[in-house]
Image (cartoon, helix red, strand yellow):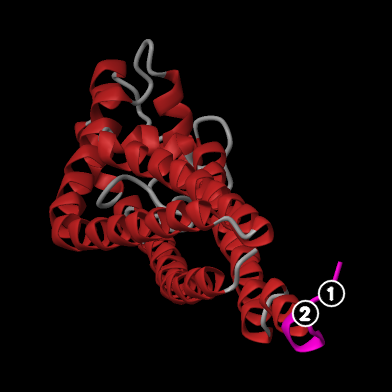
Amino acid sequence: VARPPLKIRMEAQRERNPTCGTICLKYLLFLFNILFWLAGGVVLGVGVWTLVEKSDYISLLNSSFYSASVHILIAAGIIVIATGIIGCCATLKEMKSLLIVYLILLLSIFLLEIIAGVLAYINYQELDDELRQNLKGTMQLKYQQPGEESVTQAVDKLQQQFKCCGSGNFSDWRDSVWIRAKNTTQIVPDSCCKTPSGLCGRRDHPSNIYKVEGGCIKKLEEFILSQLYILWAVGIGIAFLQLVGMMVTCCLYQNLKEDPY
């Protein structure tokens, strides 16, 4: 049997082998997916850390928005990691169908990020007002009340960690159910004291309690805002990565159509 001419064999071999551009795109998309994994891990880690370490503070807010936000963060981290895995499989196996799925997922996550960012910006002031009302009411109505042990522990932890007393200031405690019902000489909880000890809350001198340092609401707002800044920075970084990833995915898809594997 006659063999085809050398020129034809070389052209056929060239068609079966990936071009330099395709190889570069594959490695570039693979690198992108590793960065995407890391970004998803950061989002997941922040969500889990907030749920584990700051769950007490979330219970004080008496609002489903903050709790839902934490769970959305965790879900978003898992989705981003799963999307990265699909992207790696699509890249390594050179499957055009998986690349399309991957591109749709990237685009969906990108659009959801934009929607979430716009809603958070629009509703931030309203949520801030809600936070102010809820925290003061929770402190005055639930502290040291039967069945509200978790709230009591959260308030004590909040006041000690942020070095504050009351929601707006230490005088908020005068109208609390705990102070009125107990008929005690105690003015503030012992957790308001700079050096907590039994019944130290009887004295409201600035040397004894966090009186001039201000209330907890301002410090809690600053804490939440600092966490939001971190999330916004991570979100912007992920969005930029997604744009790059979508462009690289489209280029790789086109090259895979040209190269018959």
Using a 10 Å C-alpha cutoff, classify the residue at mark 2 as few (fewer than 14 neighbours), some (14 to 19) or many (20 or more).
Answer: few
Of residue 190 and residue 106, the one placed in the foreground of this image is 106
Residue 4 sits in quarter: bottom right
Give the residue at the far bottom of this rendering: 7
Q: Which residue is mark 2?
A: 9
Image point (75%, 77%), residue name? 13
The amino acid marked with disc number 2 is: Arg
Horizontal and vertical percent for residue 198?
56, 30
Image point (38%, 11%), residue name? 147
| Residue 84 located left or right of residue 110 | right
Q: Which residue is mark 1?
A: 3
Mark 1 or mark 2, earlier in chain: 1
Quadrant location of the N terminus in the rendered image:
bottom right
Image point (41%, 43%), residue name? 70
Horizontal and vertical percent for residue 2?
84, 73
Image point (48%, 43%), residue name? 74
- Distance CA(mark 1)–CA(mark 2): 9 Å
From this view, report whether residue 25 is shown above or below residue 222.
below
The magenta segment is 1-9
From this view, report whether residue 113 is shown above or below residue 55.
below
Q: Are marks 1 and 2 in contact (CB under 8 Å)?
A: yes
Of residue 5 and residue 140, the one placed in the foreground of this image is 5
Which SS class for mark 2? helix
Of residue 15 and residue 243, the one placed in the foreground of this image is 15
